[in-house]
Image (cartoon, grey):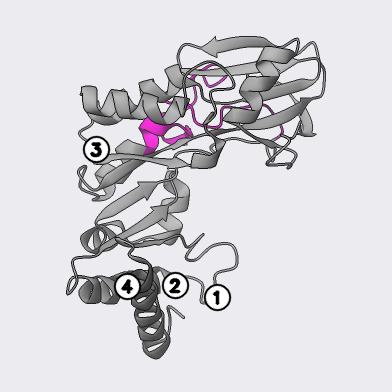
């Protein structure tokens, strides 16, 4: 679609119809990813993506509609997929997916969304770190205005199975994905609402990586990287300190919306609001 002028216009016009029919404020494009995975035209899709955004924004400007996109966070992936100055020109918000930095696809445990360099990464070159701050710094350096950059925070964690239950540190060897939640029902990932219940009802040990500013927990061979209200607040305060445009989250149904775990209804969402508006 993005490679064809005719199909781009068909996409834009059908998108406008849906927006007008249902009263939306705009459109968020989540292409994962130009020039990677199942991309059709390889490197040409970098410019095809830019052209799609340009034509969409020109049409949306007639109606005052927002155009946003979810984008990769880490440097090597950004360089493969985007012309950052160009897409930043046409997007109202650039939603930075600063999560899935590490997960059960790795050979060792790691933080889903470390804010800073943490345990196990000592001595690693800064440009090789998969952390929130390194990602933000790169996007800003690459040409995205800070007021357009929206920091993504996860309402989910990643689960691992330890190779040795006694080796439960960050960067401990793993054999693959770990526990699943009752609702997301997928090994290797768990919603905050699901995991906070497990912490209340099972023999889990919780630790906090004070450098990375995120918690992790383990029980026998199960190891989980997740975010809690404190780590979410730290991320929002970091976004404020960098004068970013705001916060994006994935995804809202994984919050503790019934206050099962005692942090108040919509625990994480209210933490974000409080940190943003307090600022």
Q: Secondary structure at mark 1?
A: loop
Q: Give the labeled residue for mark 4.
A: 20
Q: Measure the C-alpha gap from mark 1 to mark 4.
A: 30 Å
The mark nearer the N terminus, 3 or 4, is 4
Asked if residue 85 is positioned above or below residue 75 in the image, the reply reads below
Local crowd size for mark 3, using a 10 Å CA cut-off: few (<14), some (14–19), many (≥20): some
Residue 274 magenta-highlighted: no
Q: Give the labeled residue for mark 2.
A: 45
Depth check: 133 or 241 in front?
241
Where is residue 6? Give x, y as percent: 39, 90
Farthest residue, direction bottom: 6
Q: Give the labeled residue for mark 1.
A: 40
Q: Measure the C-alpha gap from mark 2 to mark 3.
A: 28 Å
**Segment colored magenta:** 107-135
The mark nearer the N terminus, 1 or 4, is 4
Q: Secondary structure at mark 2?
A: helix
Asked if residue 169 is positioned above or below residue 174 in the image, the reply reads above
Residue 132 magenta-highlighted: yes
Where is residue 27? Give x, y as percent: 35, 63
Local crowd size for mark 4, using a 10 Å CA cut-off: few (<14), some (14–19), many (≥20): few
Q: Measure the C-alpha gap from mark 4 to mark 2.
A: 29 Å
Where is residue 221? Give x, y as percent: 80, 20
Q: Measure the C-alpha gap from mark 3 to mark 4.
A: 30 Å
Local crowd size for mark 1, using a 10 Å CA cut-off: few (<14), some (14–19), many (≥20): some
Q: Give the labeled residue for mark 3.
A: 244
Q: Measure the C-alpha gap from mark 1 to mark 2.
A: 7 Å
- Tell us which disc is closer to us: 1 or 4: 4
Local crowd size for mark 2, using a 10 Å CA cut-off: few (<14), some (14–19), many (≥20): many
């Amino acid at each position: 679609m993005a490679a064809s002028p005719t199909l781009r216009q068909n996409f834009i016009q059908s998108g406008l119809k849906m927006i007008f029919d249902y009263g939306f404020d705009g459109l968020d494009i989540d292409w994962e990813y130009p020039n990677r995975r199942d991309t059709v035209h390889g490197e040409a899709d970098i410019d095809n993506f830019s052209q799609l955004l340009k034509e969409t924004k020109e049409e949306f400007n007639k109606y005052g509609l927002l155009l946003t996109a979810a984008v990769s966070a880490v440097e090597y992936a950004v360089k493969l997929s985007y012309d950052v100055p160009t897409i930043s020109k046409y997007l109202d918000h650039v939603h930075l997916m600063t999560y899935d930095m590490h997960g059960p696809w790795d050979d060792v445990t790691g933080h889903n969304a470390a804010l800073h360099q943490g345990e196990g990464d000592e001595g690693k070159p800064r440009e090789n770190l998969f952390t929130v701050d390194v990602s933000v710094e790169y996007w800003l350096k690459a040409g995205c205005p800070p007021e357009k950059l929206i920091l993504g925070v996860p309402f989910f964690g990643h689960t691992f199975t330890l190779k040795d239950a006694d080796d439960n540190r960050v960067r401990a060897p793993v054999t693959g994905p770990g526990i699943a939640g009752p609702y997301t029902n997928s090994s290797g990932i768990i919603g905050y609402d699901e995991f906070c219940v497990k912490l209340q009802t099972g023999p889990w040990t919780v630790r906090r990586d004070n450098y990375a500013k995120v918690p992790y927990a383990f029980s026998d061979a199960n190891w989980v990287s997740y975010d809690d209200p404190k780590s979410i607040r730290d991320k929002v305060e970091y976004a404020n300190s960098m004068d970013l445009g705001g916060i994006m989250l994935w995804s809202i149904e994984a919050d503790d919306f019934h206050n099962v775990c005692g942090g108040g209804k919509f625990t994480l969402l209210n933490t974000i609001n409080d940190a943003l508006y307090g600022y």
